[in-house]
Amino acid sequence: MDKFLIKGGKALRGTVAISGAKNSALPAMAAALLTAEKVTLHNIPKVRDLITMSKLLAFMDAKVSVTEMPASDYVIEAPKLNHAEAPYELVKTMRASVLTLGPLMARVGTARVSLPGGCAIGARPVDLHLKALEQMGAEIGTSHGYIEARAPKGRLTGARIVFEKITVTGTENILMAAALADGETVLENAAREPEVTDLVVLLRKMGAEISGDGTSTLRIRGVEKLHGTEHTVIPDRIEAGTFLVAGAITRGDLTISNCAPEHLGAVLAKMEQAGVPIEIVNKTTVHVRSAKKLTGLDMTTEEYPGFATDMQAQYMALATQAEGTSVIVERIFENRFLHASEMMRMGAHISIEGHSATVRGPSALSGTVVQASDLRASAGLVLAGLVANGETMIERVYHIDRGYEGIVEKLQGVGADIERVHAPVS
């Protein structure tokens, strides 16, 4: 398996262009299953999860056309779906495979989808998806690691659904399922993430009747059929946030381009409160400079528009370099402090108690061998490595390849001493 070798201590300077959002591109690709017509998607990030999703759609007999691989533009045509199944072997590394459940139920009235795999950050049960589909008339069972669902009438029926807790993929799945259902579906306590809104925009372009995007109540009036369209995926707010922290933590001077500052409100606010000078240059550009003094600050992860759990590991890395104490509370996932022990091996002063991590800084980090446990933990360890004395070797970087396009090349482009060490071919 590949590794990253980082020699810390370099201030990052220059411009980093942000790629398309992985968490927006994945449901957009799944949505292409809802129509027999051509759906063209632009600004797709060149990351492993998107390649996995394209293989999954091809298995279902959808035609996925690209001009290069990995690609940033996809043309998807699904005139017929002959395999309404997401097999384990194809999707074991990617939790987003469950996003095919809603489109399959809407389009063909049956689905067999492997229970999702992915990162070791705790349970993300799909019961909320299944309960909602049952309210829409689906019969659902699970056996041998698979969700098996069917609509006895061949078509789902609109329903009033109140999610017990906010679920992004659940909201997206039911949005897609409801787009072709009989009657109106009302989704309450729906996720408000920008990626959900981006999916609504795409579905509307395809002919779906949806209102309420950006709020916690979505109304979907089912239509007879959807048609093809063209859509550009929004920028990745987590990648943008990661590079903002990279500029701050290395005492650098970075311009983040091709981003959407309006999606970064909680991160920008927290970093400014910690003493990081940040300027929103325009609608697509943010500038971050070296802080005269980084101050420790408490942070709690919340659903959007709160501070994203996907930025928690990166914030923890920043907190190790801040003066004072920062208490980080993780409210979204129960097992998302696995990176803390690796940072502690690098010299960070962190104590964990339940859902809280207390970080005392600043700490003089020193390079060592660390292991990435999940996608965002990988990013946190990269940031720690950028400020550590000596060499940091990060193992199991296949996690980061799932969600960050060309992170090594982008960091090298702004002055980081980082390289990918390829695993020897046996």
Image: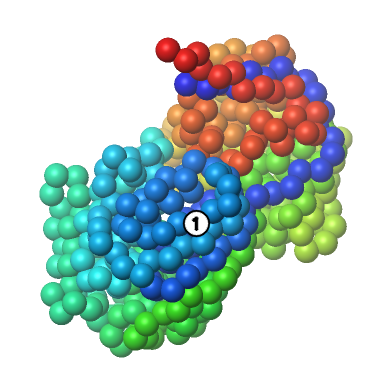
On the question of residue 345 being in view, the answer is: no
In the image, what residue type sits under mark 1? Answer: Ser
x, y percentage for residue 392? 63, 16
x, y percentage for residue 58? 37, 54
Residue 326's quadrant in the figure?
top right
User: Could you tell me which residue is drawn at 41 percent across and 38 percent down?
Assistant: 119
- Per the image, label 1 sits on a secondary structure element best described as strand
Mark 1, residues whose alpha carbon is within 10 Å: few (<14), some, or many (≥20)?
some
x, y percentage for residue 219? 42, 82
Position of 383 compared to 256: left or right? left
x, y percentage for residue 327? 57, 38
Position of 273 compared to 394: left or right? right
Residue 103's quadrant in the figure?
bottom left
Q: Nearer the viewer, residue 366 or 129?
A: 129
Instruction: Kindly identify which residue carries mark 1.
Output: 65
Position of 275 compared to 229: left or right? right
